[in-house]
Amino acid sequence: MSLGTIDYAVLALYFGFVLGIGFMMRCKVETSADFLTSHHSVPVWITSLAFIAANLGAQEVVGMCASGAKYGWMTSHFYWVGAVPAMLFIGVFMMPFYYGSKARSVPEYLRMRFDEKTRALNAASFAVMTLFSSGVSMYALGNLFHLVLGWDFTASVLLSAAIVLGYTFLGGLTSAIYNEVLQFFLIVLGFSPLAILAVLKAGGWEGMRMRMAPAMTHTWKYLGDASQNPMGIQVFGMVAGLGFVLSFGYWCTDFLVVQRAMAADSMSAARRTPLVAAFPKMIMPFIVIAPGLAAMALGQMNSGYAFPMKEGTGGPDYDMALTTLMAKFYPSGMLGVGLTALMASFMSGMAGNVTAFNTVFTYDLYQSYIRKGAPDSHYLRVARLTTVGGVALSIATAYLARQFNNIMDLLQLVFSFVNAPLFATFLLGMFWKRTTGHGAFTGLLAGTMAAAATHGLTVAEGKGGWISPTHTFPSTMAQNFWMAIFAWSFCFGVTIVVSLMTAPKPEAELKGLVYGLTEVPSDEHEPWYRRPLVLAGIVVVCLIALNAIFW
Amino acid sequence: MSDLRIPIALFFGITGILLMTVGRNHAALTDAPVNLYTGAAMLLFAGVMAWLARRHS
């Protein structure tokens, strides 16, 4: 694939604008709170779009298209069973505690609700994880641009990192959030034409349905039996593993996304952030998953498009589905827009990680354990330096990933163990006032160990089984979902048992942090379209309709 | 100029015009003038953003 002048012009224009937005936001930064939390000043339409964009990294876009080709339309469960219901839950039920607690970060909420050790555990693992994921996605981007355009790995990694550093250093969280909105629109306008063209060329939905195995174009119909669908999972594993545990765990507890909602200018706006975001989120499968399906169908037709294959082993190279489609359907001009959209998705993901890392490092680690009680200007300086340090460490991680792929796989696995039980801790912490700090901490450790044990005792596609393989899953995805289910259940159980054996915090200290002791603001004076429950109701109706149509 | 809608309108306005000027380029697998259509859509979007920003101010 080669780019023309016009394509480079679009890319340069985009770089100019994101840096320009950084400059525009620079004058708004006077305190560490301006830089790290946007000081509760961002309008709701902006926080909503940033809420989704921070998660729309390049790996998400490329990966969802790849999963569309590999697993078919069932991949939309990641949105319609996973993300969207979780977004409704955080907006309606959890946001009053996050926003109402006045915590500046998710780990800080954990300190207020539980104790210091639970916060330290969460803050430390989150900080390492954000650096790691921004490094890994940087590596993926460098690799992709090298494969597709022949660009030098180092050049594309350094250029993109320098631009992200530029605008996050200048304007902090506000600049990252504002840019995420531009990036969101670019992703939608850059990828939608591809989805439309590829699906039309494949003969529309009917044409794709006729050319592929029946399980590829349904969401629920083939979930009754794990052997009947390409993901190798059945209804319970899907709904409980992906929907309840993994997606709720991510969307409701991950500071990367929660931070966007917490930047909103009022409690009502913070609650509406994930609810408003749920509308565009519902549409995303049509933009990011449908092209993957179309690529699969086109590969089986005499269309002039051949599905990409891996060198050597000869299996399909799903990760290349998106870029090979672009090369065939986008002329010079749109090709530039498409690649800029890919760059934008990478940058929004990376800036999300960097700004979340910043806040957690500065407030939860530096201010809490390294230097307490310094003047605010000191923390602003530390936050700025942390931005530089965070980007530098991400670059180092990207090179590490390039050299030692196995270490990265191992780290990713360890993080999945740590993350899996989190939602149980938050659920109990927010809705059961008897939950204690000792309970939460032991529960988290037990859940992590349960996840590791599940992985060690089961095998899927040659992975796991390092303790003693006692069960075989048809796919790693099924293994992941079940690992999450066990981790959640262990964490939930152990937290309850240990909480009952230890002394709870006095109720006075739990005001604003727990259900029953927190005043949920009344929204009766708001017009109907601004009431959280009404918005959530509309989303639920749309969600049921989508699931029924694509049954 | 802290209204985000203005830079968004500018970015998509300029990109839209750029795409319209190379509207005749064709891709390997489609005869549709993709640049022209997407360029027009971007200009429309830019117009809506600019209108919203103006109404707000």
Image (cartoon, rainbow, N blue to C red):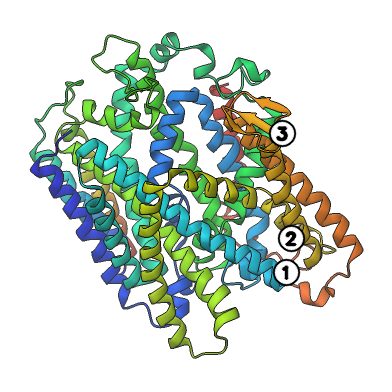
Q: Are marks 3 and 2 in contact (CB under 8 Å)?
A: no
Q: Can the viewer see residue A89 in this picture?
A: no
Q: Farthest right residue?
A: A501
Neighbours of disc 3 within 10 Å: few (<14), some (14-19), many (20+): few
Query: A522 and A474: which one is in front?
Result: A474
Instruction: Write down the residue under mark 2.
Output: A430
Query: Percent x, y for residue A465?
Result: 66, 34
Query: Percent x, y for residue A135?
Result: 40, 54
Q: Can the viewer see residue B31 in this picture?
A: yes
Of the two numbered discs 1 and 3 on the same chain, state the one appearing first in sequence. 1
Residue placed at 38% from the left, 19% from the top? A296
Q: Are marks 1 and 3 in contact (CB under 8 Å)?
A: no
Quadrant of the rendered image containing residue A159: bottom left
Of the two numbered discs 3 and 2 on the same chain, state the one appearing first in sequence. 2
Q: Are marks 2 and 1 in contact (CB under 8 Å)?
A: yes
Question: What amino acid does circle 2 point to?
Answer: Met
Instruction: Write down the residue under mark 3.
Output: A468
SS at mark 3 in the image: loop
* Residue A200 in the figure: left or right of residue A288: left
* Residue A167 in the figure: left or right of residue A233: left
The image shows residue B51, relative to residue A323, as above or below, that is below
In the picture, the quarter occupied by the C terminus of chain A is top right
Instruction: Write down the residue under mark 1.
Output: A113
| Disc 1 chain ID | A
| Disc 3 chain ID | A
The reply to whether label 1 and label 3 mark residues of one chain is yes
